[in-house]
Amino acid sequence: LAPASPGVAPLCIEAREMLATEAYAADVMTVPASLAGLPALVVPVVRSAAENLPLGLQLIAPRMAESMLLEVGQALEHVAAEHTHSGTYTVSISHDHMSSLL
């Protein structure tokens, strides 16, 4: 698990006006997994209080574990959607289930 970005997503108009260095800085959290050749997926899990924009959680899996990554991402997305208004939630995946996905 890792943050997906250092903050909320920029508005479209802000993104179009970003300098290349600002755009790179916004993606800096996703670069290590890419450079390491690891499958990664970002799932929106909450919305910021001030801007009501999505904040994502980056899931990173071992090499060749894309199916596990997608299954965990789908479960997290489902739980996040159910509990968007409560502000807290728990995702529980047993070690045996995780091992069976590998």
Image (cartoon, grey):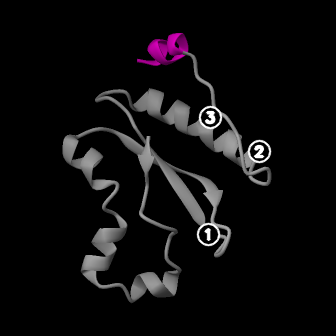
Gap between marks 1 and 2 measured at Cα:
17 Å
Was residue 5 drawn as part of the magenta stretch in this picture? no
Residue 99's place in the image compared with 31, above or below, is above
Q: Position of residue 50 (x, y in %)?
A: 66, 74
Task: Identify the magenta region.
Answer: 95-102
Query: What type is the residue that disc 1 sits on?
Result: Leu
Find numbered disc 2 in the image and state the secondary structure of the residue it sits on: helix
Sequence-wise first label, 1 or 3: 1
Q: Which residue is under mark 2? A: 82
Is disc 2 surrounded by few (<14), some (14 to 19) or many (20+) residues within 10 Å? few
Along the viewing direction, whichever of 38 and 67 lies nearer the viewer: 38
Residue at 68% across, 46% down: 80
Gap between marks 3 and 2 measured at Cα:
11 Å
Query: What type is the residue that disc 2 sits on?
Result: Glu
Picture quarter containing residue 51? bottom right
Is disc 3 surrounded by few (<14), some (14 to 19) or many (20+) residues within 10 Å? some
